[in-house]
Amino acid sequence: MLRAFSTAATGMTAQQMMVDVIANNLANINTTGFKRSQIDFQDLLYLKMREAGTEIASGINSPSGLEVGSGVRPASTVKVFTAGELQNTSRPLDVAITGEGFFQVSMPDGSTKYTRDGALQMNANGQLVTTTGYAIEPSITIPSDALSIGIGKNGGVNVTNSAGAISVVGTIQMARFPNPAGLSSEGDNLYAQTEASGTATTGTPGENGLGTIQSGFLEKSNVQMVSELVNLITAQRAYEINSRAIKAGDDMLRTANAIGNG
């Protein structure tokens, strides 16, 4: 009976973590470039009271074993990098990626992080930066006399000055990974490279498997509210059922104890 307590407790813990993951997905439903997470579970070790194929009589083997599981554990959370819906903002510095790839972001410590959030801005020096203020990589500076800015599908940043001359001031480079799900979530809409993600391959948008850039658009979160709410209900009911398993075990122990008191 005590085994049922600990087994059901692992189920409650697992479903609680699933609710935590779903809550984070729903909290970021309006976060630009956000990618939803899903949680994977694994069953725990089994108590094997009889192995399958054990000889139970002369020349007769058991067709199945006798084993009791000890519960479940969360195995991993995986980022799902399906494309989000594109939202038309008509703002020239808003860019969305159509296809695979990430924008590169230069961090103050010299490292490089990656993002799908294309809500770019200009700082006081005219550099293109993220909403947090980190410069994109390679660095692109907009001249102070620029009257208009255009970003092409290949990442080329064109500016028109006061004399009407058009010039290219830089090209937005992108990166892709063999296993994007292995990237580490760092907050601020940033991801970091890990051993699991593999090494970044950089290049020009539209080449070598990289997606293209859509200027004037932002990629919305890929969280589907209906799916998340269904998952939330499933997790809640699973949590309740596991709590009932604990209550059932407690009732059985109470009944056994009442026999001795009778």
Image (cartoon, rainbow, N blue to C red):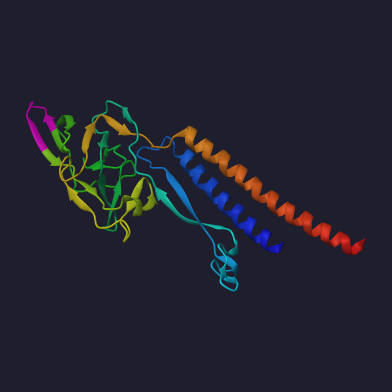
Q: Is residue 243 above or below residue 228?
A: below
Q: In this view, does 261 lie above or below 210?
A: below
Q: What stretch is highlighted in magenta?
A: 159-168
* Front one among 23 and 127: 23
Residue 226 makes an appearance in the image: yes
Residue 216 placement (x, y as % from top left): 25, 29
Residue at image position (29%, 38%) is 118
Residue 48 placement (x, y as % from top left): 59, 68
Within the image, what quadrant is residue 217 found in? top left
Magenta portion: prevailing SS class: strand
* Front one among 34 and 258: 258
Q: In the shown orientation, is residue 110 left or right of residue 144?
A: right
Give the quarter of the figure containing the C terminus: bottom right
Number of on-image labels: 0
Residue at image position (57%, 66%) is 62
Q: Furthest-right residue in view? A: 262
Residue 3 placement (x, y as % from top left): 67, 63
* Front one among 34 and 235: 235
Residue 84 placement (x, y as % from top left): 35, 35
Within the image, what quadrant is residue 53 found in? bottom right
Residue 22, magenta (yes or no)? no
Residue at image position (70%, 49%) is 244
Q: Furthest-bottom residue in view? A: 58
Residue 160, magenta (yes or no)? yes
Residue 143 makes an appearance in the image: no
Give the quarter of the figure containing the N terminus: bottom right
